[in-house]
Amino acid sequence: MKLHTKILLGLALGAAAGVAVNMAAADAGWLAWINRNVTGPVGQVFLRLLFMVVMPLVFATLSLGVAGLGDLRNVGRVGAKTLGYFLITTALAAALGLLLVNAVRPGDGLPGETVERLQGIYAGQAEERLASSGAAGFGIDTFVNIVPRNPIRSAADMDMLGVIFFSIVFGIALAMIPAERSAPMLRWLEALADTVTKMIDLAMRFAPYGVFALIFVVTSTFGWGLLRQLALYIAVVLVGLLIHATVTLSVIVRVFAGLNPIRFWSKIREVVITAFSTSSSNATLPTTLLVAERTLRIPPRIGGFVLPLGATMNMNGTALFEGVTVLFVAQVFGVDMPITKQAIVVVLSVLTAVGAAGVPGGSIPLLMVMATSVGVPGEGIAIILGVDRILDMSRTVLNVAGDLTAACVVARSEGAWDPADAEDAARVEAFPDEPLDEAPAAYRPGRRP
Ligand code: ASP
């Protein structure tokens, strides 16, 4: 059986088993025991295997990507295109969310006692998450902190933006020193990229079990009853995400990348499943990079630049979710939201989506800060916390899919990639059954035209 079929099977079986057990024995002691001692640890090990390679991978791929772009002008141009793409698509996603939430108004009919009960249960959790995130200090320092004082500390703290900043400057400098001086460092970085890529290959062999476990823990302990009470709100978020995927992103793929959207989605299926089960753009990044190179055939110097940036900065799904949620909470608490205020919500959704960490629930603390700043009670976000995991899984899929569309569009606009390249790779699996013999990563500057 092909690996991606196995992973899909792990997802389906994990979800089915979790839902069945939840229906039969949600509060049973043995279920808690299993999740604490078996499925929980198995899922965590899989997540950690992915997280473990993220920092070396980002450093190697991004600095090689930047060095491969050659001079500063190229880096500037590709960087500007990439950021422009991120901002436009993220704003489109947020605007789409607002359109839907205004049309459906899911917050209007929510009974007062449901609101009170949900707040009673989740208010403490909301406060805790805000306090521990440091998001309350969101402001100019957030931007100053992008420049790390100590890149090792950034890596240790999983501070992606700090590592990204260091890697970009490192790559630029590498391209500026004489070729004979930079050659050993480039070779070293290539070896590093190849080695961590091999580590991802190995980790992905474990994915079917890891995905099973992660999904089982979520579905077996989830309060499904909550879904019914917030059904309309959840539907608005999910339908918004679906429209963004099937219309906005698919049209972009068709028009600007020249690729058949159905082909695109089928080529990135491993990314979709990994994002859905881990709820984390960062944990999915290794898979995203490999899929981009192996099944879409995007040149590593573009993929290695756009994708690490995208994993932290480009969050279409998160922006859509944030816009819907702030408006939903405003509707619940009867806060008036005129169009001017909603325009501010779009801008803030984009900014906070850029600032949110690519980890499970990474956007929640910033979302609370943002709600407060437009006059919507930030503690009100507590009412959706109980269902957030399901929404998080879904929005993360859009977040990473958006990174891959960005890589296609930027690569094509640079004349570095042709959709026919991806078509050629039609039969190539991202994780073939036979491990690739040759060093699989081609993060070699200039190796491909
Ligand atoms: N979990 C999301 C991601 O990693 C971030 C969020 O919206 O909470 O992309």
Image (cartoon, rainbow, N blue to C red):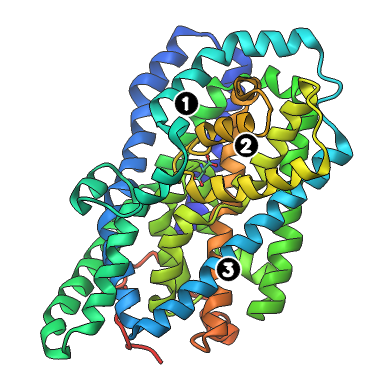
Q: Residue at x 60, y 30 (%)?
A: 388
**Whole-number angstrom distance, CA of label 1 to CA of label 3:** 30 Å
Is the C-beta separation of discs 1 and 3 under 8 Å?
no
In this view, the mark in front (1 or 2): 1
In this view, 360 is above or below 49? above
Sequence order check, earlier mark of 1 and 2: 1
Residue 350 horizontal/vertical position (percent): 60, 51
Taking the image as shown, residue 170 lies to the left or right of residue 66, namely: left
Q: Residue at x 67, y 46 (%)?
A: 320
Residue 378, visible in the rendered structure: yes
Q: Which residue is mark 2?
A: 391
Please tell me in which quadrant of the rendered image residue 381 appears.
Answer: top right
Tell me if the residue at label 1 has its CB under 8 Å from ligand 1.
no
In this view, 211 is above or below 24? below
Q: Please name the amino acid that badge 2 sits on.
A: Leu
Residue 21 horizontal/vertical position (percent): 56, 20
In this view, 343 is above or below 172? above
State the count of labels. Answer: 3
Residue 4 horizontal/vertical position (percent): 49, 57
Determine the secondary structure under disc 1. Answer: helix
Q: Residue at x 81, y 22 (%)?
A: 334
The circle on residue 84 is 3
**Whole-number angstrom distance, CA of label 1 to CA of label 2:** 19 Å
Is the C-beta separation of discs 3 and 2 under 8 Å?
no
Q: Please name the amino acid that badge 3 sits on.
A: Gly
Q: Residue at x 55, y 45 (%)?
A: 352
Q: Which residue is mark 1?
A: 130
Residue found at the very far bottom of the displayed protein: 449
